[in-house]
Amino acid sequence: MAHRKSSLALSEAIGALQQEITDCQLCPRLVRWRERVAREKVRRFQEEEYWGRPVPSFGDPSAELLIVGLAPAAHGGNRTGRVFTGDRSGEWLFRALYQAGFANQPTSIHRNDGLTLSRCYITAAIHCAPPANKPLPIEIKRCRPYLLRELALLQKVSVIVALGRVAFDVTLAACVKSGRVPSGGRRRFSHGAEYRLNEDLMLLASFHPSQQNTFTGKLTPAMFQRIFDRARQLVETGKNPSRRKVVSKIDGLA
């Protein structure tokens, strides 16, 4: 009974935080942009009602894997209201999560399509779609408290996958700020890099599955899948016995 109450309290706390995110108005530039995109729809989505607000995080409150992206896509999450949903990046991400056993289906079309995540939670460096997919440093700073609160709530997380350099840097800064990770050390972004941040937390770096990376072949399906297969392995084993800060490059990704 105590465990059930604890799980309920966690779910309620995460739900309250996501409502705060959805109601956020802290960044005037992002408010104007996300609302403008929702009004001036692209032709292929003319008949749809856009979300046009900050996009909350999504996933299992008992997650052991945390995924940190950059921001909602203007005609993806900003349209559908769910992170990585309704765009090409989401197609890559949820296919990989499904194959690694973290999702119940390989596709994500809209927020009521039945997709559920198991042992996995997805958030972002910022929760509003930014112009040209480029948030300003002050906007990242304003959004960081949400990530800090998620890190505090998601106590079971043992593996973090950061999608792209910005997400990698934001994640490291938040982990240090939260007190879970000591400052210092050389932790540089490269696809497939692994860092042991403390005895119980690993960070994996991946190229973002943006069209800029996937259309050019910089990121292939096999490269991306290996990231999440490795995340699954680390989640299952709990702790890497090597205890090295930089554990390794994933095979085939160096």
Image (cartoon, rainbow, N blue to C red):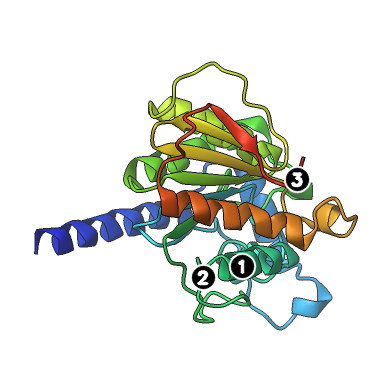
Residue underneath mark 1: 94
Instruction: Indicate the quadrant where residue 187 lies.
Output: top right
Neighbours of disc 3 within 10 Å: few (<14), some (14-19), many (20+)? some
- Amino acid type, callout 2: Ala
Mark 2 and mark 3 in contact? Answer it, CB < 8 Å. no
| Quadrant containing the N terminus in the rendered view | bottom left
- Amino acid type, callout 1: Phe
Tag in front: 2 or 3: 3
Q: Secondary structure at mark 1?
A: helix
Residue 131 position in % (x across, y down): 75, 48
Residue underneath mark 2: 103
| Quadrant containing the C terminus in the rendered view | top right
- Say whether disc 2 or disc 3 marks the residue closer to the N-terminus: 2
Residue underneath mark 3: 253
Choose between 25 and 167: the one closer to the eye.
167
Q: Which mark is residue 102?
A: none
Q: Residue at x 70, y 46 (%)?
A: 251
Neighbours of disc 2 within 10 Å: few (<14), some (14-19), many (20+)? many
**C-alpha distance separating marks 3 and 1:** 21 Å
Q: Secondary structure at mark 2?
A: loop
